[in-house]
Amino acid sequence: MKQRPTILLNPGPVTLTQRVRKSLQREDMCHREADFAALMLDIKSRLVSIYSEAEKAFEAVTITGSGTCAVEAMIDSFASRDRVTLVLSNGVYGERIAAMLAAHGRPFRELRADWRDPMELGRAREALAYDPGIRQIVAVHNETTTGRLNDLMPLLDLCSEFEADLMLDAVSSFGAEWIDFAHPRLMAVASTGNKCLHGIVGIAFVLVRRTQFERRSSNSDGLYLDLFRYQAAQVDGFSPFTPAVHACFALQEALRELEDQGGWRARRQRYRQLSERIRSKLATLGVPTYLDVDAYSSMISSFRLPKGWDYPGIHDALRSSGFVIYAGQSGLYREMFRICTMGDIQDEDLVRLLAAMEELICGRSTQ
């Protein structure tokens, strides 16, 4: 049997299914034509229908760029110019949100937790009680720095208690983890097509509660990241700027495939099964997880580097076997590595991966 091409085990971009890959071979299309507008309206409709609770109250706004682009567009468009926005961070991506607020000159307070720990909800409660002017909170759902899935329920409860709205970075969770779109304090959710949805890099989006567009004006201090400008243009399926046309082809097909496969719950279950098999095997090989197992999202786990290995060594050994893993970020580079189960990962791929892991770890230990 012919071995598949290199399998990506990084948290996006993902290994594409043949169905999505084939969609990229469609006839070229002008983004100002009616058939492309119809395609974009279909994408917007499919995005809000992934979570049934989102259909009535939220609108999807697409933007060409990465997941970071969507998050920054959300921040630029909605973060207050005069009131403090509270940022809860426990990893690279929460800290990046604080950097965005600083870059746009918005007042904010960051409650920074250790990257190994949950968000600082106790300190958040104190901050909200101390400053009743805080009406917005921003947080990352799946903090892929470590793979921690931050718990939304107590965060949304806190938002309700203090009448604050939540802007959520769901770049690595939308389409495969539970998000409470029915909660009245969930204001906006930013994500991208090239992670849990299994599209390609280039198209991102923000799901925004419709009342935000109806009751307020934009806070954007720029042009390209202004979601109000996109929302107004996309009513008819068009965009104010040239979109990544082929990324839109791929996203539409990826959304169809997600629906055919059973939706976000089925995808979460598939991710979870693969992740559990990987964690179980590595545990038997003496490779512990970096966090407690219960802290992880369904699709990404972090592991301490095996004894006698540095990251380049284990990366290169697995790369030669057809797999790309992911390094720890910043100061974690020398401590751990990450494996993600997003994308088209088949059972036979996992069997090969686990065999390769066993060979390299056991082989080194016997030398």
Image (spheres, rainbow, N blue to C red):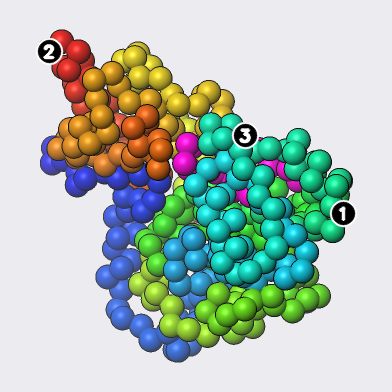
Q: CA distance from mark 2 to mark 3?
A: 39 Å
Camera-near label (1 vs 3) is 1
Camera-near label (2 vs 1) is 1
Is 309 left or right of 223, judged from the image as shown?
left
What residue is at 33 percent from the left and 32 percent from the top? 334
Q: Specify the quadrant of the image occupied by residue 149.
A: top right
Q: CA distance from mark 1 to mark 3?
A: 24 Å
Is 30 left or right of 294, judged from the image as shown?
left
Q: Quadrant of the N terminus?
A: top left
What residue is at 40 percent from the left and 20 percent from the top? 288
- Residue that carries the numbered disc 1 in the rendered image: 132
- Asked whether the viewer can see residue 364, the reply is yes
Q: Specify the quadrant of the image occupied by residue 165.
A: bottom right
x%, y% of residue 313?
20, 32
Q: Secondary structure at mark 2?
A: loop
Q: Quadrant of the C terminus?
A: top left
**Foreground pick, 21 / 111:** 111
Q: Of callouts 2 and 1, which one flags the residue occurring earlier in the amino acid sequence?
A: 1
Q: Of callouts 1 and 3, which one flags the residue occurring earlier in the amino acid sequence?
A: 3
Mark 2 burial class by Cα count in 10 Å: few <14, some 14-19, many 20+: few
Name the residue type under label 2: Gln
**Foreground pick, 226 / 261:** 226
- Residue that carries the numbered disc 3 in the rendered image: 118
Q: Which residues are magenta?
A: 139-156
- Residue that carries the numbered disc 2 in the rendered image: 367
x%, y% of residue 350?
30, 32
- Residue 48 - label: none
Please say if 119 is above or below 27.
Answer: above
Please say if 279 is above or below 31.
Answer: above
